[in-house]
Image (cartoon, grey):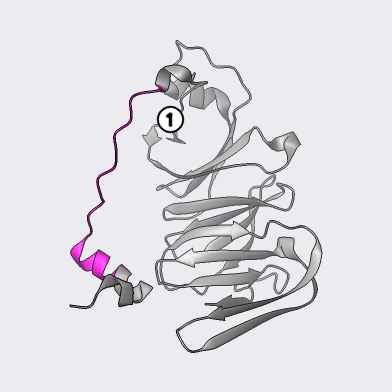
Amino acid sequence: MESSGNRSIFQNIRSRELHGFRVRKRACFADDSSRFSRLGAFDYGVEDDVSPPMALSFCKTSKNAHILAVTGEDGYVCLYNTRLKFSSSSTSAENAEKARKCEWLAHENAVFDVCWIKDDTNLLTACADHSIKVWDSQEKKCLLALTGHTGSVKSISAHPSNNGMLITLSVIFPPGKELDVYLNDYLYMEDIIVSGSRDGSFALWDLRCSKSTGSHSDTL
């Protein structure tokens, strides 16, 4: 039998999906909840359709850091104001109604990840429909749809730097074959994002390359 140490990541994923896997037991720690105070609990969902939240992200700038984006199985993006004070006697549904600033239907499928970019003016959503969308967070308007993955997009992340720089990314994948991705000129790295998909790949996207569906990407 082939040991897990010699198997590729894709073989491990395939084995896990087909046969499941066991989580090793972890130590149980005493309840330390008395050391913390809960500011408030919220029901996620639109109207009476309460669905489990899938992803959460606070705004990145200090002036908007109290705004929380939440996405779920229903495809909606909801923005909440967490700066408000909530009564201990209020229900989670009442808190949600009070704190919710706005919501909109971003996808017709589950949204697995959300990420703020460009000083919180834009929002990225990663969806089970294999796409990523770039949103104007004020107008709630889709600016760009990124397609190319062949599986659910599970995670997205923006480059942490806002400074222009020249970089060379060298990735060894698959073993023995070198793929060089050159991001030429002095790119504004805030336009570079990365997405990870259930199809077993992650992709680098340059949001400046196109204003229409299918912005340029390098899939690794």
Question: Which residue is found at the position 33% from the left and 25% from the top?
Answer: 30
Badge 1 amino acid: Asp
* In the image, farthest residue toward the bottom: 177
Q: Position of residue 58 (x, y in %)?
A: 61, 40
Q: How many marks?
A: 1
Nearest to the observer: residue 170 or residue 205: 170
**Dominant secondary structure of the residues highlighted in magenta in the image:** loop
Question: Which residue is found at the position 62% from the left and 84% from the top?
Answer: 180
Q: Is residue 35 left or right of residue 135?
A: left
- Name above or below for residue 179 compared with residue 35: below
Nearest to the observer: residue 171 or residue 18: 171
Question: Which residue is found at the position 49% from the left and 22% from the top?
Answer: 40
Write down the region rendered in magenta: 13-32
Question: Badge 1: how crowded within 10 Å, few (<14), some, or many (20+)?
Answer: some
Q: Is residue 112 left or right of residue 61?
A: left
Q: Position of residue 70 (x, y in %)?
A: 51, 41
Q: Position of residue 147 (x, y in %)?
A: 53, 71
Q: Disc 1 marks which residue?
A: 43
Q: Indicate the quadrant containing the N terminus: top left, top right, bottom left or bottom right.
A: bottom left
Element on which disc 1 rests: loop
Query: Residue 208's quadrant in the figure?
Result: bottom right
Q: Position of residue 49 (x, y in %)?
A: 38, 36
Magenta-span inclusion, residue 21:
yes
- Name above or below for residue 69 compared with residue 160: above
Q: Is residue 189 left or right of residue 96?
A: right
Q: Is residue 84 left or right of residue 26?
A: right
- Name above or below for residue 123 compared with residue 209: above
Question: Which residue is found at the position 32% from the left and 68% from the top?
Answer: 13
Magenta-span inclusion, residue 175:
no
